[in-house]
Amino acid sequence: MAEALQPVRGTRDLIGEDQRRFAHVVETARRVSGLYGFDEWATPIFEETRVFSRTLGETSDVVTKEMYSFADRGGDSLTLRPEGTAAICRALVSNGLTQSLPQKIFYAGPMFRYERPQKGRYRQFHQIGAELIGAAEPLADAEVIALGRDILAALGIAEATVLELNTLGDAESRAAWRDALIGYFRDVASGLSDESQARLERNPLRILDSKSPSDQALLADAPRIDGHLSPTAQVFWDGLRRGLDQFGVVFRENPRIVRGLDYYSHTAFEFTTDSLGAQGTVLAGGRYDGLVAEMGGPPTPAIGWAGGIERLALLLASAPAAPVPVAVLPTGEATQQAAITVLQSLRAAGLRAEQSWRGTLKRRMERANRIGAGWAVILGEDEVARGAAQVKRLATGAQDEVALDRIAAHIAARR
């Protein structure tokens, strides 16, 4: 016997309850996003490597340690997408949509990062995401965050999360903050990890992302951006918080939420939970006014977020119930054509319907019970000759003779 093959480490199969949870997250997010006026886009799973290296930062952990990059047969460097926003911005520019703004985009699909697999984190993982491109007002940020909140509420998990919010200011604010950070970290450089010491001159904001215990101990006293906001950035920050109040979105300010790349500005936020252990962030995003320009487009304001489908699915109180099928049971070859006609009429009416292809009526009934059928349509030769069948409700045993062309309506009315 050949060796049984297994899924690649960090990937998994979605079957049964897992798939129903997964699909429920995507379908709910798609429905609520549509209510907000977002249209769904789908971009390729792989892109030119520079789509991500240019936008995520050549020295970021994602680019240097986690991307699945490869040379194709033509020698081009391609990368399985590690996140969705860069691909959406590339699509905006590639399809000539920078003159048709704003664009409100929803997406869902797989992403790929080479990370240590653990609960809620996989090497092939999946995200839902929303991007509002072409709106510069703080109220746009508030609405995008409200969309995320409403998706969580529609999933029944909003109460299990907390919205944490910060400002990254504008370019003037970040320049002043950067200088203050450099001065602070230079004074304590001997206590920084080797990686943070290397980042000190190149990009000190990335030190704030460090997970090193020695770095964490120094971050508590690091300068905060709210002490360096320009007047313009302060107005935006005030407008964002006022807008969230107008949308009824509760938040908690957290100055530790940062983004290390220059095209991020103003808003940064995370919906977090304490129900998933270390994987506490379930939906996060921010404003990225410089990203479209990195893709070769004009300077374009934008705000968006992404949510991990696996983590959101884990928070669901229960899996959506599987559809209850109707079992169609012909009693012999003479009733097979009638069985197919009934099957198709049930499906046309939106009812899940299945047929066993062989076996005695007893064996077919056993299978109907095994698949959790709610109804059995039994087609005996005498009934079919009269243009009818026996329709049995399996939970109660109640049974009626119903005309073949009325079976779908009969069951639909009694579900």
Image (tube, helix red, strand yellow):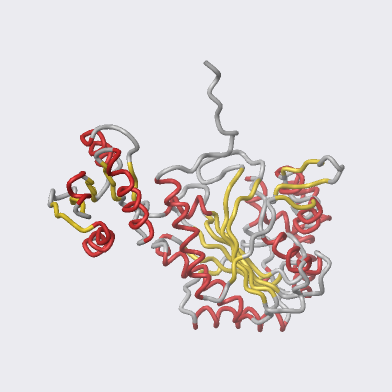
| Residue 219 percent across, percent down from the top left | 65, 56
Relative to the observer, which residue lies in front, 328 or 141?
Answer: 328
- Position of 43 with respect to 386 (left or right) is right
Task: Spot the residue most to the front.
Answer: 385
| Residue 307 percent across, percent down from the top left | 55, 58
Give the quadrant of the C terminus: bottom left
Relative to the observer, which residue lies in front, 177 or 281?
Answer: 281
- Position of 252 with respect to 100 (left or right) is left
| Residue 104 percent across, percent down from the top left | 62, 73
Image quarter of residue 122? top right
> Total marks drawn?
0
- Position of 130 with respect to 333 (left or right) is right
> Against 106, is 200 above or below?
above
Which residue occupies 28% across, 32% down? 359
Which residue occupies 32% across, 34% down? 358
Relative to the observer, which residue lies in front, 224 or 248?
Answer: 248
Which residue occupies 22% across, 36% down? 361
Task: Spot the residue most to the right.
Answer: 75
Relative to the observer, which residue lies in front, 132 or 63?
Answer: 132
Image quarter of residue 371? top left
